[in-house]
């Protein structure tokens, strides 16, 4: 149920003691946060949360204003990031529950498996959430090292709805395939994940490596260490973001210490928008419409920052649409790795990052939700929505102190069209004014429905692959 931050690092020169090592093969680091809002970073508009390390990254690199998660919920979003596929192609939707009989199929190729195939060391630290059965855990999905929790941090006995709705077991903390603890307090987890990530960089600084840092925060329940408690003007949620910013700074400092930063791409983003019904424990997607659990802009448009000193001019802002499914093929092009044998949906966006192109390699991006419902399509500056139901607070305040309120449900009764270049908040439906644009987007929608299906129209589709299943 969450959200994500991301960093990609491309190789460099590393130093240990008096020895200098030429590691020209690029390193890759992805930092993925959980449920972080579009405006929860200073350079994206936050005035009540200090994020100096991320703000400096934006000054040293570029800021992507139109970057999308693969879907607006945990497991599906992570599957899209790590495989380059729309989650629907993989048969993954929603968030896997503990002891699920399903997970990311071993027939799919993750970024870790792709890079391990060309000699990379691979590690994941933080939240997994792609199946907690041993068959689907990280060490079977291309990762040499794993430290973290197998699913969202609220799937534990202290959930506010434990008893009436849920019956969660203790939350396990894994070291590779072994449970080393069960968590009753998560205040030190961000620090532990950061320390383990730093150790991984130090231990592998003479080899190309892929490091995936998947912070469980700021997904509820919120936890922060004493060093950041009470530091933010946004309360506990802001404290958590400040600690994540500190973590990013620690990782960047370690790369600098080992002379790995000069030829390193750094990408920061999140897995989906804020969980709005948690109120003061939720993030802010302003000025976007709605949040997590919807295909509307606040559900999937994420803050994203990229730093790549050798190829990217500092201080740029790019509004070309991009999506997390494009990360895998971009890494493949940069590193020379082979793309997966199975069909993927993402395409390399390296030339957009470097300023060699301002044209998306995609004609459109598709926004699915629920089991397999096509809710929206991004086509250039346009966003079109099909009739569907979505959750909303309808202007009400969310919960307080970690307790949620119930959502209302709204319905889009007919096709809606928005010009995002003029109306980022999606306030003015212009479908009647641009029938030709609507017709073009509907043609694209019919094509993807034939391939990936759409349960709203009883379209089965021909391009889906089965989700991993415990037989």
Image (spheres, helix red, strand yellow):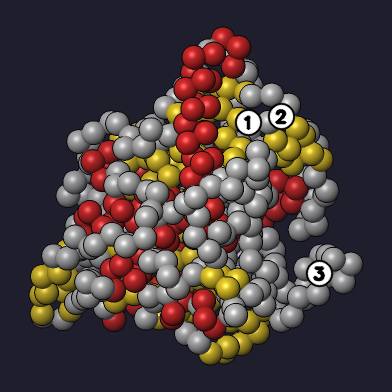
The foreground one among 97 and 109 is 109
Mark 2 residue crowding within 10 angstroms, few (<14) / some (14–19) / many (20+):
few
Which of the two labelled residues, at mark 3 and mark 2, occupies the earlier sequence position? 3
Q: In this picture, is 332 found above or below 177?
A: above
Q: Where residue 166 is drawn, which disc sits there?
A: 3
User: Which residue sits at x=32%, y=62%?
Assistant: 340
Answer left or right for 276 relative to 75: right
Residue drawn where x is 49% and y is 18% of the image: 437
Q: Residue at x 77, y 34 (%)?
A: 410
Asked if marks 2 and 1 touch (Cβ < 8 Å), the reply is: yes
Of the residues tagged 3 and 1, which is closer to the observer? 1
- Decide if residue 432 is in sight here: yes
Q: Outermost residue toward the right? A: 164
Could you tell me if the residues under marks 3 and 1 are in contact, i.e. CB atoms within 8 Å? Answer: no
- Disc 2 is placed on an element classified as strand
Q: Earlier in the sequence, mark 2 or mark 1?
A: 1
Q: Residue 181: x, y in percent?
A: 61, 87
Task: Please rate how many residues cluster around mark 3, counting C-alpha atoms within 10 Å: few if below 14, some from 14 to 19, many from 20.
Answer: few
Q: Check disc 1: other Cα within 10 Å, few if <14, some if 14-19, many if 20+.
A: some
For numbered disc 3, what is the local secondary structure?
loop
266 relative to 298 in the view: left or right: left
Q: Marks 3/2: CA distance? A: 31 Å
- Position of residue 142 in the picture relative to residue 366 (left or right): left
Q: Quadrant of the N terminus?
A: bottom right
Decide which of 110, 190 is in the foreground and name it: 110
The CA span between labels 3 and 1 is: 33 Å
- Residue at 53% from the left image edge and 27% from the top image edge: 442
Residue 113 placed where, x, y %?
Answer: 34, 71
The residue pinned by badge 2 equals: 412
| Residue picked out by circle 1 | 386
Given residues 81 and 229, the one toward you in this image is 81
């Amino acid at each position: 149920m969450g959200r994500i931050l991301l960093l990609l690092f491309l190789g460099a020169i590393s130093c240990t003691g008096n020895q200098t090592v030429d590691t020209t093969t690029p390193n890759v680091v992805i930092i993925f946060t959980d449920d972080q809002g579009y405006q929860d970073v200073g350079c994206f508009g936050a005035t009540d949360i200090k994020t100096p390390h991320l703000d400096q990254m934006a000054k040293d690199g570029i800021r992507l204003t139109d970057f999308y998660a693969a879907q607006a919920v945990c497991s599906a979003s992570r599957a899209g990031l790590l495989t380059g596929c729309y989650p629907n192609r993989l048969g993954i939707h929603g968030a896997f529950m503990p002891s699920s009989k399903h997970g990311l199929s071993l027939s799919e190729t993750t970024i870790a498996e792709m890079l391990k195939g060309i000699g990379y060391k691979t590690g994941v630290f933080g939240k997994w959430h792609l199946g907690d059965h041993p068959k689907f855990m990280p060490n079977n999905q291309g990762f040499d090292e794993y430290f973290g929790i197998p699913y969202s941090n609220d799937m534990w006995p202290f959930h506010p709805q434990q008893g009436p709705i849920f019956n969660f077991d203790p939350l396990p903390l894994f070291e590779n395939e072994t449970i080393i603890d069960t968590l009753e307090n998560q205040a030190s987890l961000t620090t532990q994940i950061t320390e383990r990530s730093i150790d991984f960089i130090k231990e592998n600084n003479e080899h190309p490596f892929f490091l995936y840092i998947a912070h469980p925060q700021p997904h509820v329940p919120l936890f922060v260490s004493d060093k950041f408690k009470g530091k933010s003007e946004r309360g506990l949620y802001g404290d958590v973001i400040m600690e994540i910013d500190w973590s990013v700074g620690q990782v960047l400092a370690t790369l600098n210490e080992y002379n790995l930063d000069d030829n390193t791409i750094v990408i920061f983003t999140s897995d989906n928008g804020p969980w709005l019904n948690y109120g003061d424990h939720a993030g802010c997607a302003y000025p976007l419409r709605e949040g997590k659990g919807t295909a509307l802009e606040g559900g999937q448009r994420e803050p994203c920052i990229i730093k790549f000193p050798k190829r990217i001019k500092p201080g740029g802002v790019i509004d070309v649409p991009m999506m997390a499914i494009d990360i895998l093929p971009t890494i493949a092009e940069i590193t020379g790795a082979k793309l997966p044998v199975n069909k993927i949906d993402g395409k390399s966006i390296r030339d957009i990052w470097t300023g060699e192109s301002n044209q998306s390699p995609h004609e459109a991006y598709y926004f699915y939700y629920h089991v397999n419902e096509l809710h929206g399509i991004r086509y250039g500056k346009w966003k079109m929505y099909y009739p569907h139901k979505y959750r909303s607070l309808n202007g009400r305040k969310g919960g307080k102190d970690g307790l949620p309120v119930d959502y209302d449900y709204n319905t889009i009764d007919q096709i809606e069209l928005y010009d995002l270049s003029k109306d980022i908040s999606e306030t003015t439906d212009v479908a009647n004014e641009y029938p030709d644009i609507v017709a073009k987007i509907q043609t694209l929608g019919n094509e993807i429905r034939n391939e990936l299906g759409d349960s709203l129209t009883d379209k089965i589709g021909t391009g889906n692959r089965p989700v991993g299943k415990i037989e």
